[in-house]
């Protein structure tokens, strides 16, 4: 059976998740290279935190686009990747049909090398990393505090040379990157962290994760939480040139998918963080693009 009528079984894949990146962060950010790749859509994610969102992605369920991106990816047909074990569907309504336990296994079964890299704590867990042939973890040891500032080498996109060396000699690959920059504390390890943001995070830390019950003990305003949203926007803007460099280094026909795994509240009903099915947590950007160098 033919796998794809859209040549997707001939293209290497770059799949990037912007951790905690809600839709309006993406829309408001100055990220000229990313936005030049293709149009993007507001989309509804399947998980309120890293694990369920990524497990859905790796089973072929990307966020639900609210406008048409491709003939086979629109509000009614949402199958860029589909497993053959699913219900029968016309090949015209599927980007690529794969046979395996999950999407990564399906690409492996047609000869792709499966490489991943990320820095959120969930990517220390074998539930996610065992899906890859090789997984490179770049992230802080945040077992004591999720709010500790990160060093410059603790981001996947700051280790592009090492990552590209893992795939550049392969004909086809599936490269997954989880970008930590947009996750709390929204610093990028490059000295751009302001004292004001640091102070807000310190005094609001007990309500992160939308812990409303702790509000009575916290002296923080909605306006201060909204300043953290600006910090997330600034963090995303640092990612743009890094992704541009990555794509240029790969220099081959690519399928590129960029999305948020989930969003983040920044003061809506005095919520901060994620983990609950709030509008700003469920709404993420989704971009699907093709490059032909």
Image (tube, rainbow, N blue to C red):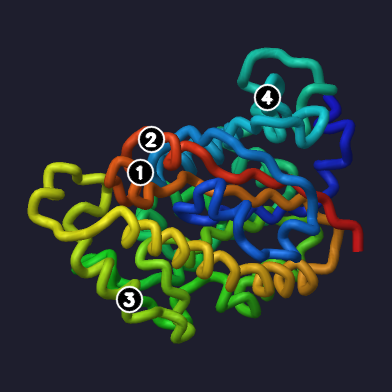
Query: In front: 122, or 195?
Result: 195
Depth check: 175 or 262 in front? 262
Cα separation, mark 2 vs mark 1, equals 9 Å
Of the numbered discs 2 and 3, the one sitting upstream in the chain is 3
Judged from this view, the residue extending furthest toward the bottom is 191
Determine which of the numbered discs, if any, sits on residue 141 in the image: none
Residue most toward the left?
217
Checking the image for residue 278, the label placed there is: 2
Q: Earlier in the sequence, mark 2 or mark 1?
A: 1
Instruction: Specify few, some or many for label 3: CA neighbours under 10 Å numbering under 14, 14-19, or 20 or more.
Output: few
* CA separation in Å, label 4 and label 1: 27 Å
Residue of label 4:
75
Residue 106 in the image: state x and y as whole percent.
Answer: 65, 38
Please state which of the two labelled residues, at mark 4 or mark 2, is closer to the viewer: 2
23 up-or-down from 241: above or below: above
Q: Give how far across and how far down residue 47 sits, in percent.
A: 43, 36
- Residue 203 in the image: x percent, y percent? 19, 66
Q: Determine which residue is flagged by label 3.
A: 196
């Amino acid at each position: 059976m033919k796998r794809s009528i859209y040549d997707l079984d001939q293209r290497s894949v770059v799949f990037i998740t912007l951790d905690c990146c809600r839709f309006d962060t993406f829309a408001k950010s100055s990220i000229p290279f990313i936005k030049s790749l293709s149009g993007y859509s507001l989309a509804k994610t399947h998980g309120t935190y890293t694990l369920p969102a990524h497990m859905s992605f790796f089973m072929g369920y990307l966020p639900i686009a609210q406008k048409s991106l491709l003939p086979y990816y629109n509000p009614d047909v949402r199958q860029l990747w589909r497993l053959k074990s699913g219900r029968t569907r016309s090949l015209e309504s599927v980007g690529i049909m794969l046979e395996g336990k999950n999407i990564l296994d399906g690409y492996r079964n047609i000869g792709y090398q499966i490489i991943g890299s990320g820095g959120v704590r969930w990517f220390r867990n074998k539930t996610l990393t065992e899906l890859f042939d090789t997984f490179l973890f770049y992230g802080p040891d945040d077992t004591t505090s999720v709010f500790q500032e990160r060093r410059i080498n603790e981001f996947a996109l700051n280790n592009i040379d090492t990552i590209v060396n893992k795939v550049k000699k392969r004909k086809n690959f599936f490269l997954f990157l989880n970008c930590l920059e947009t996750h709390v504390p929204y610093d990028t390890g490059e000295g751009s962290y302001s004292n004001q943001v640091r102070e807000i995070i310190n005094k609001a830390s007990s309500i992160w994760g939308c812990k409303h019950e702790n509000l009575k003990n916290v002296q923080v305003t909605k306006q201060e939480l909204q300043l953290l949203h600006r910090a997330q926007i600034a963090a995303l803007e640092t990612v743009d040139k890094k992704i541009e460099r990555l794509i240029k280094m790969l220099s081959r026909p690519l399928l590129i998918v960029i999305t948020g795994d989930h969003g983040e509240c920044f003061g809506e009903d005095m919520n901060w963080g994620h983990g609950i099915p709030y509008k700003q947590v469920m709404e993420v950007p989704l971009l699907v693009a093709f490059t032909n160098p």
